[in-house]
Amino acid sequence: MEFPCGKKLSNNASQRTPKVFILLALTLIILGIIPLHYTSKWYSATNLANHESEKSSTYHIEEMEIKIMDDETCDISIGEWIPNPDGPYYTNTTCWAIHEHQNCMKYGRPDTDFLKWRWKPKGCELRIFNPFQFLDIMRNKSLAFVGDSVGRNQMQSLICLLSRAVYPIDDSISPDENFKRWKYVDYNFTLATYWSPFLVKMKEADADGPTKTGLFNLYLDEADDKWLSQIEEFDYVIFNGGHWFTRCSVYYENNQLVGCRYCGLPNVTDLPSTYGYQKAIRTVLRTINNLEKFKGITFVRTFAPSHFEGGEWNKGGNCVRRKPFISNETSLEGLNLELYTIQVEEFKAAEKEGKKKGKRFRLLDTTQAMLLRPDGHPSRYGHWSNENVVLYNDCVHWCLPGPIDSWSDFLLHMLMFEGRRSHEEKLQFMKQ
């Protein structure tokens, strides 16, 4: 036998040829099996390319094939905002889900630089949200947002990001805009929102109240039935809250008056807003831990600070900065720090208790990232200049598109690890 180069193969070599081919065949078989064994760690670029449309033309093919990092220990909550020339990934003309008061481009915001940043965690990468990958993960599943209007802000951001792949249909069972359900038919994925700004049972005692923002009776040890009666059917639930707890409220526990916040009622103890907030968060998480039929995953999305400067929200305060802070330019302090600390402490306590019952809790920690984005709010660009609105300079909510879109980056990152993490927790629970 001769090679193409003309050298003869020796008789000994000729006898070894079948063995060589056998070894080569075995090697090819092994190499073929290994990728099949680890397919869960890859998302196919080919599949994404087949899905490609004009809506998602800003994607780069190299970003579409996503390998989940083996190292899950990176803390994505700590980092900096870095330039991202590819943003934004939708506009107010390509997405119909934007709430009027967050539609900053429609109402004349003149700058666009605030759209050109992405969150870079310290020590690792956070991939830009990929709608096709998210929808594949959420196939045959359901996700609910429970909380205040910032939670609704997050849901609408997610809808806009997903619109580059597909739009949902309205599947609401109520005409109330505060309780919406959307269905992604091709993926059998349901998205819902439950407006519950205090998370616990609430009754409006006075539409005006001492400060013209209402007076509310809060039953701090009773979860709000508006979400409690619906939540067991969902695979994922994201809770948020905080901003409403600075309003004038009367606190009840065991149906007994225990105090209030700025209520002005005689012989009633004035308590800090953090008192009501801690009780409410504790009630929500304890309720989840006691729901026998709820088998889903509970996310606690941490508090997103507002950025009023030069005064309070109703005393001329505004947010006029036009670029992010870097991490050493500001710090979490005051009420923002207190609310965040309460969330983390109550989350840890609930997570510890939940592990005894097979419950799963996750902390969606976006606080540090959003603390650094004073430039991302609507300010006066959430309405026409001559409109009479309660929050004229809005430094609480977030422009769409805008920095809040990064929350979907956080969420997708966590979901990519969820299968392995849930499996490990299930094994630990079974060993108890």
Image: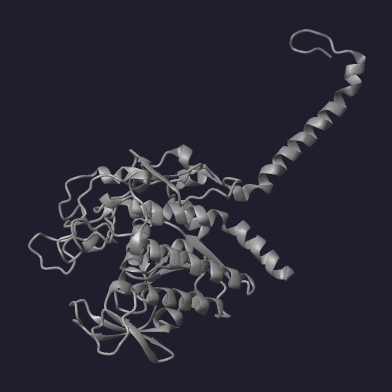
Up the image or down, 276 lies above or below 396; here it is below
Q: Quadrant of residue 101?
A: bottom left
Is residue 314 left or right of 94 when viewed as pictured?
Answer: left
Q: Quadrant of residue 117?
A: top left
Q: Nearer the viewer, residue 315 or 350?
A: 315
Q: In this rendering, does residue 164 appear at all?
A: no
Q: Residue at image x 92%, y 15%?
A: 11
Q: Quadrant of the C terminus?
A: bottom right
User: Residue placed farthest to the left in the image?
Assistant: 386
Q: Position of residue 104 (x, y in %)?
A: 21, 55
Q: Position of residue 71 (x, y in %)?
A: 59, 46
Q: Nearer the viewer, residue 180 or 351?
A: 351
Q: Position of residue 255 (x, y in %)?
A: 40, 92
Q: In this rendering, does residue 255 appear at all?
A: yes
Q: Nearer the viewer, residue 207 or 257?
A: 257
User: Residue placed farthest to the top in the image?
Assistant: 6
Is residue 275 left or right of 37 when viewed as pictured?
Answer: left
Is residue 167 left or right of 9 when viewed as pictured?
Answer: left
Up the image or down, 167 lies above or below 226; here it is above
User: Residue placed farthest to the bottom in the image?
Assistant: 255
Q: Quadrant of the N terminus?
A: top right
In this figure, which colouring scheme has been used for the structure? Answer: one colour
Q: Nearer the viewer, residue 381 or 21?
A: 381
Q: Position of residue 386 (x, y in %)?
A: 7, 62
Q: Residue at image x 77%, y 7%?
A: 6
Q: How many marks?
A: 0
